[in-house]
Amino acid sequence: MKRYFLLLALPALVSACNIKTKDQLAGDSKTDSIKRVQQLKAQEDAMKNTTTVQLIDSAYNFGTIIQGEKVEYNYRFKNTGTNPLVIFDAHASCGCTVPEKPEKPIMPGEIGFIKVVFNSSGKKGHNEKEINVNANTNPAFPVLKLFGEINEK
């Protein structure tokens, strides 16, 4: 009886896993899925070879600006470890702040930049934004800060 149950349960289990995979891939093209798998593999490989980072610029006070102005700033950091520093992702606390991460690894001893553009449209008063960076650093890449005052037009 147990054998028959296993024989019946096995195909159900396999097809359930297959349905989940199809659902997951339905929204993505095969190319997108392959790229995502390659990105995850690269991330996994990079995390095996962690490095250390020293921030040269951790916070930027843009002072006082007029509503609608854009602020650009390049945060500098140095790879102080022995392995290449790979930044996987950089994202801000809101959509008005857009970070651009370096695409290539930062080699040991080199200085890298994360460009951030803040759009003050619709903002007023004191504003503080945080930029979180996901990289192969240990300890984790420190949070970057951007702040200042925005006067109405």
Image: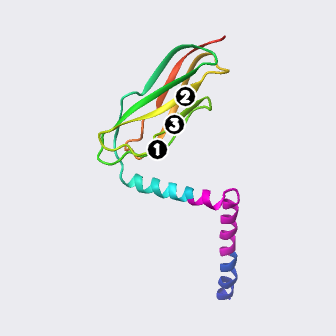
Residue 3 among those drawn in magenta: no
Q: Which mark is residue 4?
A: none
Q: Nearer the viewer, residue 150 or 12?
A: 150
Residue annotated with mark 3? 100
Quadrant in which the N terminus appears: bottom right
Left or right: residue 79 versus residue 29 is left
Q: Nearer the viewer, residue 32 or 7?
A: 32
Q: Measured from the top left, where is residue 90 in percent x and y?
A: 51, 39
Q: Magenta segment, which residues?
A: 13-34
What residue is at 51 percent from the left and 55 percent from the top? 40
User: In the structure shown, which secondary structural element does the residue marked by tag 2 occupy?
Assistant: strand
Residue 55, quarter of the rendered image: top left
Residue 26 among those drawn in magenta: yes
Q: Measured from the top left, where is residue 20 in percent x and y?
A: 68, 64
Residue 32, quarter of the rendered image: bottom right
In the rendered view, tell whether residue 124 sits above or below residue 58.
Answer: above
Tag 3 near tag 2, CB within 8 Å: yes
User: In the structure shown, which secondary structural element does the residue marked by tag 3 occupy?
Assistant: strand
